[in-house]
Image (spheres, rainbow, N blue to C red):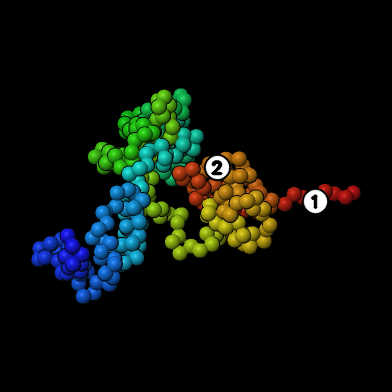
Amino acid sequence: MNFRNFRHLAVSDPQPGSRASREPGRNSPNDRRTLFERVLEFISPGPDSTDELIETLADAEQRELIDPESRSMLEGVIRMAGLTAGDVLVAAPRMDLLDIASPYDELLAEVIDCAHSRFPVYEGERENIIGILLAKDLLKLQRAPELNLRTLLRPAMFVPESKGLNELLRDFRSNRNHLALVVDEFGRLAGLITIEDVLEEIVGEIQDEFDDENAESGIYTLADGSQRVAGDADIGAVNATFATELPSNGFETIGGLVAHELGRVPRRGESVRIDALVFTVMLARGGAVRWFKVTRAPVAPEADSN
């Protein structure tokens, strides 16, 4: 093909019925692409890697072919294809479990405190999961105490750490399960993963009852006068609110500082004191604290000078 024919092919109108003629904005009077861009589009093959595909999405957003929200979700779908259950799971030590041998009042208190809709239930050892209890099913024992808790358990779904998230999402939909227990290569309990964890890889963080989309500082005053502080709140914002001088220790967020002081990520209900403040975990998810309840530490009485 000589250059004259090539140039004609690159800049002329597409033939009727061709793919280009069916796509809005291509070679139309409003098409803002330069001749050089059209030539590159003609001679350049499509993306042949994930990174190139993501770059193509970024270019599509810049050209206003898709909006930022759509681009973010599409990128989430692409990246999710390379993730496994082991990449997203909540590790076994941080799982909220119910003991089948616990009295009803203790089970109810645990369900209310954790505020999950589903709980793995174990017998004897924590790794011996015998089923899944739906929180709403526990109420049946309130009306019919003669029922056996075991009869209310749903079968537990077990998946390997290597299970791909896209395949797991398909299983969740087909089996109508919302929670799966993850086992390692030796068959030991590695953690759990929920359908929400998988969907958040696509759409981002899903808002819950603790979230406020209008939040800026991530610090709110509760009815009892204490403060609710987001785990990703800036340490400087916390210091400004409480008139304290918490050290950063190389961290930017209060969640990072608390985990550093404790030596691990605290669980729901645990409290950590740093200087004059006490941080109690209200909500933890995916290996990170989402919300703290923050109160001032009680002041020690002054010693009698006499």
Residue 127 appears in view: yes
Question: In what element is the residue under mark 2?
Answer: loop
Give percent across and percent down for residue 142. Answer: 38, 38
Q: Which callout, 1 or 2, points at the residue further toward the start of the chain?
A: 2
Residue 198 numbered mark, or none: none
Q: Quadrant of the N terminus?
A: bottom left
Q: Amino acid at mark 2?
A: Val
Give percent across and percent down for residue 29. Answer: 21, 75
Residue at image mark 1? 302
Question: In what element is the residue under mark 1?
Answer: loop
Q: Residues within 10 Å of mark 1 (few under 14, many from 20)?
A: few
**Which residue is rendered at x = 56% and y = 50% of the image?**
255
Q: Answer with the quarter of the image where residue 149 lies.
A: top left
The alpha-carbon separation of the residues under discs 1 and 2 comes to: 34 Å
Report the side of 16 relative to 149 (left or right): left
Residue 265 numbered mark, or none: 2
Q: Amino acid at mark 1?
A: Glu
Q: Residues within 10 Å of mark 2 (few under 14, many from 20)?
A: some
Of residues 265 and 135, which is closer to you in this image? Answer: 265
Of residues 4 and 300, which is closer to you in this image? Answer: 4
